[in-house]
Image (tube, grey):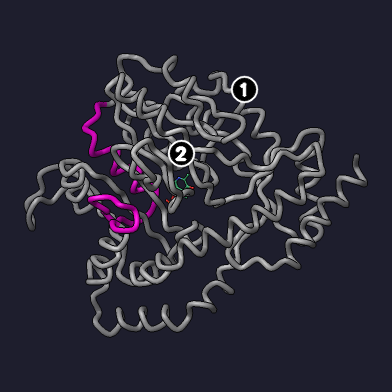
């Protein structure tokens, strides 16, 4: 699905030198690379505070911990997402309330949010799935009206521009807190685990800085229960180099998406990803919705030709055993269930060659011609 080896070859001299630099100073934890990366990411995103942490799941957990919620408080999220988004809600003793997604954007459908709000609702966690931003303008308006916190799960959309009335901003900087992951295959990925939290709110930033470091306010004084969640210096050094490439990486992904869009336009059974008007799709995934074409058969056919294709995600959160005790399996999410049966993600990354695209597209055409 990605080609991190070819990508590394292109930045190898810079990456190798940066990693050696960390080794030679032995400042492995909270070293100068971490501070430089933090401030470079603040500039790139246009946010006041970036708080690096150990991974994207921690980022979401720490953001929720900072809100001072009580057990049983409700958090609205989509079910059509990677499990981490919803898992941390349950881990903290909060209650995930699953809301259906929009069939075109794959993101939470803002028109369904208000019906799920109760006196216990405290936060909304929209997910910018596959690199397509959720409708943040509507979500923020609902949040304001009902006095809710908004935590953006930006793990798949870092670098996306969002057009607000006042001008363009980056996704992850619109809600009260934004979270991301630097898992290697993400659009901005390191060479291990990493994550970050962003906010423009000074108080939340101070709280989250304490939480990532054992709830510590000053050395060995622990004001609240926290965690140990750090981005290490080697990962920060790699990320500084890759952050400079991020916009080029996004462009490369968008070119692949354009190629696929053009090719698949001839097949009525293939719905290509819809690009929301209000944001710039960064194509973490290129996900087809198939109608009248058997998704699982196509997936198997491509596998035979050694073309990877993935189902993100085969089981939505509300149907996971993990949430059985929440009774969420009975929640009606018809769009989520419908999409779960029909989505298929194709390879998309920064190093794709035209030859590979031709092979993938022609193989899919072959499948359709044989099975149609
Ligand atoms: C990757 C991902 C996460 C979790 O990130 P990790 O770094 O793997 O913990 C959370 N949410 C979404 C939508 C993701 O894609």
Residue at disc 1, CB closer than 8 Å to ligand 1: no
Q: Is residue 345 above or below residue 44?
A: above
The residue located at (69%, 44%) in the rendering is 344
Q: Secondary structure at mark 2?
A: loop
Q: Indicate left or right for 307 with 196 as reference.
A: right
Percent position of residue 17, x then y: 38, 83
Q: Are marks 1 and 2 in contact (CB under 8 Å)?
A: no
- What residue sits 50% from the left and 47% below the top? 280
- Relative to 21, is 108 above or below? above
Q: Nearer the viewer, residue 334 or 65?
A: 334
Q: Position of residue 181 (x, y in %)?
A: 41, 53
Q: Nearer the viewer, residue 362 or 118?
A: 362
Residue 334, label in figure: 1
Report the Cα–Cα distance between label 1 and label 2.
Answer: 18 Å
Q: Residue at x 23, y 65 (%)?
A: 35
Label 1 neighbourhood size at 10 Å, few (<14), some (14-19), many (20+)?
few
Mark 2 CB near ligand 1 (8 Å cut): yes
165 or 8, which lies in front?
165
Q: Position of residue 33 (x, y in %)?
A: 27, 71
In the image, residue 192 sits, relative to residue 209, either above or below, namely: below
Please report the bounds of the magenta region as a residue range. 42-70
Instruction: Assess whether residue 359 is covered by the magenta stretch.
Output: no
């Amino acid at each position: 699905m990605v080609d991190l080896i070819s990508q590394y070859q292109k930045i190898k001299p810079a990456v190798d030198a940066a990693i050696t630099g960390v080794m030679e100073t032995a400042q492995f934890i909270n070293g100068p690379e971490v501070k430089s990366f933090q401030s470079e990411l603040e500039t790139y995103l246009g946010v006041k505070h970036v708080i690096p942490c150990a991974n994207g799941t921690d980022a979401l957990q720490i953001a929720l911990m900072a809100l001072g919620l009580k057990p049983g408080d409700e958090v609205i999220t989509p079910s059509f997402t990677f499990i981490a988004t919803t898992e941390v809600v349950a881990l903290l003793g909060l209650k995930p309330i699953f809301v259906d997604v929009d069939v075109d954007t794959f993101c939470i459908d803002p028109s369904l949010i208000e019906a799920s709000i109760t006196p216990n609702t405290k936060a909304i966690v929209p997910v910018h799935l596959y690199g397509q931003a959720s409708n943040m303008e509507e979500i923020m308006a609902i949040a304001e009206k009902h006095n809710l916190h908004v935590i953006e799960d930006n793990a798949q959309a870092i670098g996306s521009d969002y057009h607000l009335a006042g001008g363009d901003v980056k996704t992850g900087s619109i809600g009260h807190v934004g979270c991301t992951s630097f898992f290697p295959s993400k659009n901005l990925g390191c060479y291990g685990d990493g994550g970050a939290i962003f906010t423009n709110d000074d108080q939340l930033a101070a709280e989250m800085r304490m939480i990532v470091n054992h709830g510590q306010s000053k050395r060995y004084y622990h004001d609240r229960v926290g965690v140990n969640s750090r981005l290490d210096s080697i990962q920060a050094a790699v990320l500084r180099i890759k952050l400079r490439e991020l916009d080029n990486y996004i462009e490369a992904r968008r070119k692949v998406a354009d190629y696929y869009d053009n090719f698949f336009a001839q097949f009525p059974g293939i719905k290509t990803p819809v690009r929301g008007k209000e944001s710039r799709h960064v194509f973490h995934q290129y996900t087809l919705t198939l109608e009248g074409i058997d998704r699982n058969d196509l997936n198997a056919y491509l596998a035979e030709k050694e073309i990877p294709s993935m189902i993100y995600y085969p089981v939505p959160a509300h149907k996971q055993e993990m949430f059985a005790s929440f009774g969420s399996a009975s929640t009606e999410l018809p769009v989520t269930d419908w999409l779960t049966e029909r989505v298929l993600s194709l390879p998309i990354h920064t190093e794709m060659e035209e030859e590979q695209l031709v092979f993938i597209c022609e193989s899919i055409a072959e499948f359709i011609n044989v099975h149609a």
